[in-house]
Image (tube, grey):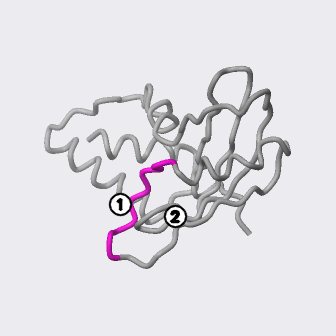
């Protein structure tokens, strides 16, 4: 049930899609079978999604700001990172991002490449946060 609830929480207010409709149908079928919703009002689910797409990397000395990176991932590894825009001192962090395990489930025998974008935020903390943007909101051209 939590998988369906979490998947649907990212779709609140979005235009219905065939996948969203299918998820909603399956969630409703579970409720009809007596499986109670774990989060009836979606409480905390956005936080769970945010946590799953946030990664921490060491902050470079005195670097502050933000940057957008594109990440190309295969079944084996991150194939490529590209600095798109942002604060110039963060450009070199693409190499660090390339070594993150982003947990993107590309099937082992697949030749597909996933393209995701993410935002790197660095403040005065000892680590920076790299946050993958949801695929439907990625600004990829």
Q: Give residue 79's position: percent from left, percent from top.
A: 55, 66
Q: Give residue 80's position: percent from left, percent from top.
A: 61, 64
Q: Which residues are magenta?
A: 100-109
Q: Circle 1 is placed at which residue position?
A: 22
**Quadrant of the snapshot with the N terminus:** top left
Horizontal arrangement in the rendering, residue 76 relative to residue 84 (left or right): left
Q: Circle 2 is placed at which residue position?
A: 73
Q: Which residue occupies the extreme right position in the image?
A: 88
Residue found at x 77% / y 43%: 90
Q: Report crowding for label 1: few under 14, some 14 to 19, many 20 or more residues within 10 A (C-alpha).
A: few
Q: Report crowding for label 2: few under 14, some 14 to 19, many 20 or more residues within 10 A (C-alpha).
A: many
**Quadrant of the snapshot with the C terminus:** bottom right
* Relative to 27, residue 112 above or below: below
- In primary-sequence order, the first of circles 1 and 2 is 1
Q: Secondary structure at mark 1?
A: helix
Residue found at x 79% / y 27%: 62
Horizontal arrangement in the rendering, residue 128 relative to residue 36 (left or right): right
Determine if the magenta segment contains residue 101: yes
Quarter of the view holding residue 44:
top left
* Relative to 30, residue 65 above or below: above
Q: Which residue occupies the extreme bottom position in the image?
A: 111
Choose between 31 and 104: the one closer to the eye.
104
Quarter of the view holding residue 84:
bottom right
Distance (Cα) linking label 1 and label 2: 27 Å
Q: Give residue 25's position: percent from left, percent from top.
A: 31, 55
């Amino acid at each position: 049930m939590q998988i369906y609830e979490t998947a649907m929480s990212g779709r609140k207010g979005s235009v219905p899609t065939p996948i969203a409709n299918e998820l909603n149908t399956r969630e409703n079928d579970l409720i009809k079978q007596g499986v109670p919703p774990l989060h009836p009002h979606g409480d905390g689910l956005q936080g769970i999604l945010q946590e799953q797409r946030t990664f921490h990397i060491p902050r470079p000395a005195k670097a502050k700001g933000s940057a957008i990176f594109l990440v190309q991932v295969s079944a084996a590894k991150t194939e490529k990172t590209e600095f798109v825009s942002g604060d110039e001192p963060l450009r070199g962090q693409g190499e660090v991002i390339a070594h993150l395990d982003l947990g993107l489930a590309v099937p082992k025998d697949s030749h597909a490449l996933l393209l995701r974008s993410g935002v790197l935020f660095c403040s005065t903390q000892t680590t920076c946060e790299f946050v993958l943007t949801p695929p439907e909101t990625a600004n990829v051209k």
